[in-house]
Image: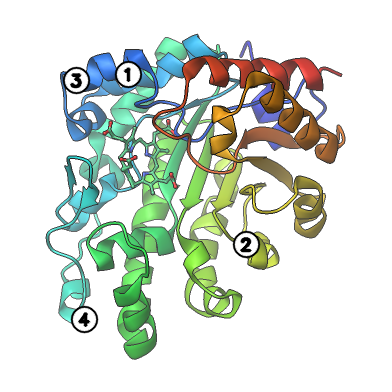
Amino acid sequence: MQNDHFLKACRREEVEYTPVWLMRQAGRYMPEYMEIRNKYDFLTMCKTPELAAEVTLQPVNRLGVDAAILFADILLPLEGMGIDLAFAKNEGPVISNPVRTGEDVENIRILDAEEATPYVMEAIRLIRRELDGRAPLIGFSGAPFTIASYIIEGGGSMEYKNCKKMMWQAPEIWDALMEKISEVLLRYLKAQIKAGAQAVQMFDSWVGALSPDDYETYVLPYSKYVLSGLKGEGVPVIHFANNASSMLELVVQAGGDVIGVDWRINLDEAWKRIGYDRAIQGNLDPFTLYAPPQLIAEKVKRILQMAGNRPGHIFNLGHGINKETPVENVIALVEAVHEYSRR
Ligand code: CP3
């Protein structure tokens, strides 16, 4: 491995500089991505290992980030469960048969991940060969709540009304659904590790919709099931919970070697609450990348200062990169992190 700064930081080992990668680093803000995307729809790209591999490598080559993240989507395991998935133009994910009743939950299948998503595992094997040690490869999944929110609402949501209705009106159906989802996600991540993912991240993008109390009762046990099930697998596990600074301690309780935090909390305070026995990942506001390079550099310095050269900080955004972000600002960000953090 020529660049193992990311993996070292995940294990809280000393590094020469703070490693950086960006959530959603492969995507529409990059002209080379758009060149491929103009020819194929998004799901076709995910399901064609050669295309997924090519797009995964683009940010490594162009930005000089310290890790690659598999080009895929958190919703890919849905199809194997018997749930229809489509990406409508400008609308994001759409599920035409959302899960609302006990019968719907009973009908959900639990397949092995190699059978349900063979193209993901094939992409991982191909990417590892093409990366050839230039950077480690991160695999990922959604977290049980975030996946449940899409399955129940039928797409993205603002209020999570149907989700909360199920949680509170039919807790036994909620539990049965969360159990099935957790099992699928654990198998999916284990298969990714077996195929060659050198770290995995579980994205709980929408969990901030819940109160800490409800998180603890209705979600934490399932996130914990997935995260503790990965303990013997020998790779670092990142647990990213977006908009969850009101319940960081609970997020830590659910598990993860690295805790990903958004920008709504200062990194020093977040790390203190998480505990220094975990690594931390974050936490620049993605829209900072619209600011002039001088200001980006200042904000980078500020976050590095808050991390205080303590081993175990992985620089990242607080959430995914926005699709209109200027590429040159992203390059400037990566350079600034490397330059200002050099020990
Ligand atoms: O980080 C990476 O570069 C790896 C690829 C990746 C994608 N989706 C590609 C993608 C990752 C890690 C994801 C995770 C994902 N997918 C999440 C969790 C991360 C987060 O942002 O919280 C979520 C919630 C999804 C579900 C999803 N997929 C949505 C809401 C959308 C539409 C978003 C939009 O901006 O239109 C997608 C589509 C998607 N996934 C795109 C990409 C590059 C855009 C597809 C396109 O080219 O049109």
Mark 1–mark 4 CB contact (< 8 Å): no
Number of the label disc, if any, that sits on residue 251: 2
Q: Give the Cα separation between the discs numbered 3 and 4.
A: 41 Å
Task: Say if 83 sits above or below 33 in the image.
Answer: below
Q: Which badge, 3 or 4, is on the more N-terminal residue? A: 3
Report which residue position mark 3 lands on: 38
Report which residue position mark 1 lands on: 33
Task: Say if 133 sits above or below 178 in the image.
Answer: above
Q: Give the Cα separation between the discs numbered 1 and 4.
A: 41 Å
Tell which of 266 and 218 is nearer to you. Answer: 266
The response on whether ligand 1 sits within 8 Å of label 1 is yes
Which-is-in-front pick, marks 3 and 2? Answer: 3
Q: Quadrant of the N terminus?
A: top right
Q: Which badge, 3 or 2, is on the more N-terminal residue? A: 3
* Picture quadrant where residue 306 is located: top right
Say which residue appears at 33% left-offset and 82% top-offset.
Answer: 165
Quadrant containing ligand 1:
top left
Tell which of 97 and 331 is nearer to you. Answer: 331
Name the secondary structure under disc 3.
loop
Tell which of 96 and 173 is nearer to you. Answer: 96
Q: Is residue 314 left or right of residue 225?
A: right
Residue 250 placement (x, y as % from top left): 65, 67
Q: Give the Cα separation between the discs numbered 2 and 4.
A: 28 Å
In the picture as drawn, the residue positioned furthest to the bottom comes out as: 169
Q: Is residue 105 visible?
A: yes
Q: Give the Cα separation between the discs numbered 3 and 1.
A: 9 Å
Number of the label disc, if any, that sits on residue 102: 4
Q: The disc labelled 1 sits on which kind of residue?
A: Tyr
Q: The disc labelled 4 sits on which kind of residue?
A: Gly
Q: Which badge, 3 or 1, is on the more N-terminal residue? A: 1
